[in-house]
Image: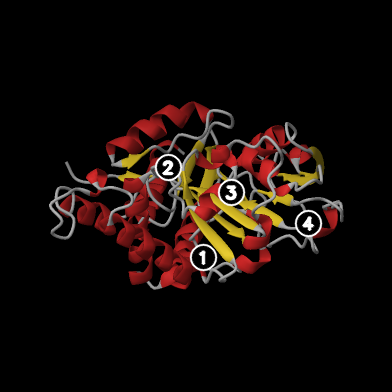
Amino acid sequence: MSRVFNFSAGPAALPEEVLQQAQAEMTDWHGSGMSVMEMSHRGKEFMSIAEKAESDLRELMSIPENYKVLFLQGGASSQFAMIPMNLTRGNSATDYINTGAWSKKAIAEGKNFSDVNVAATTEDSNFSRVPHQDQINLNANAAYVHYTPNETIGGVEFNYIPHTGDVPLVADMSSTILSRPLDVDRFGMIYAGAQKNIGPAGLTLVIIREDLVGDAMPGTPTMFNYKTHVDNDSMYNTPPTYGWYLAGLVFQWLKDKGGLQGMAEINSRKANKLYDAIDTSDFYANPVDPHCRSWMNVPFTLANAELDKTFLEEASAEGLKTLKGHRSVGGMRASIYNAMPEEGIDALVGFMAEFERKYG
């Protein structure tokens, strides 16, 4: 069977070149006689894999030397608790910006460990936009400010980095990391689940400024303390080694594609093609303020919702898979992360035009 165009929000498509390399190395990595899945995480073979992955990531993102890079488990959702456990540092006041489903989950967990101030929310607009900077009511004495730059479910994205003064800015970048260049030094901490733009599910990336490590609240479990992982190079226990290896292959693939600037140009073209197809039609609609539209997750609806099932069935028959919108919002959603080739967007846009011709 030929490869389909997989528009899943996550676990998402991986670059075909990466999968082919992993396939070629599956049973024997570089003459070691072992699969990466079988290697000791402390052996020289895997240590070389781990070191190269971190080095390539630092190069791609221009990560300053005073930031630590951690390869962890537990998904981004575990970070919702780890962040207040580690970053409140004796100050229970925290600021959160609420722009959708993932922000709300972070807020709910944050309330278990801190005094959360919702500094801004766009719930009154059904999360169809992000707040302007002057609409964010920050507490200058907060331990940190948390936000979600891209809401995967709603397809809403910040088109700016909030200014937070001297208060560390913390960002859940699970669905937007590595999609374009980023000023890492604007952040106290960045975290991301791997299963969208980094690699397979099971790996979680944390990039944290050194001064924010080492003052976890009393009673923080050993595995939830960032210092544990910093002191042990992410190997206090057995890390998700195969996920780490595949992430390294993705980082190399990104370098071969022209780095994050190259990906930004590709991703911008992809998103513009799809939004243009939606905006120039009365048959399709996108609910998000055009100034806040996501490059990575594009929700859209049909003028006649009774055709949703037919759209999905016919799209699937054409090799356009997992386009069903999240159950909380309905409609359709095309997640077009780094690994989605432009050919996939062209195929989707062509299908949408033909479907409108038949049923519009």
In this rendering, position of residue 226 left or right of residue 23 = right
Q: Nearer the viewer, mark 1 or mark 3?
A: 3
Question: Is there a contact, CB below 8 Å, between mark 3 and mark 2?
Answer: no
Between discs 2 and 1, the one toward the N terminus? 1
Question: Is there a contact, CB below 8 Å, between mark 2 and mark 4?
Answer: no
**10 Å crowding of disc 1: few (<14), some (14-19), many (20+):** some
Between discs 3 and 2, the one toward the N terminus? 3
Alpha carbon separation for disc pair 1 and 3: 27 Å
| Amino acid at dot 3 | Tyr
Alpha carbon separation for disc pair 2 and 1: 32 Å
At which x and y percent is residue 355? Answer: 39, 41
Please identify the quarter of the rendering in which residue 266 is found: bottom left
| Amino acid at dot 2 | Asn
Mark 1 falls on what kind of element?
Answer: loop
Mark 2 falls on what kind of element?
Answer: loop
* Mark 1 lies on residue: 180
At which x and y percent is residue 173? Answer: 57, 52
* Mark 4 lies on residue: 132
Between discs 1 and 3, the one toward the N terminus? 1
The image's mark for residue 312 is: none
Between discs 3 and 4, the one toward the N terminus? 4
In this rendering, position of residue 162 left or right of residue 273 = right
Question: Is there a contact, CB below 8 Å, between mark 3 and mark 4?
Answer: no
* Mark 2 lies on residue: 237
* Mark 3 lies on residue: 226
| Amino acid at dot 4 | His
Q: Residue at x 60, y 35 (%)?
A: 221
Mark 4 falls on what kind of element?
Answer: loop
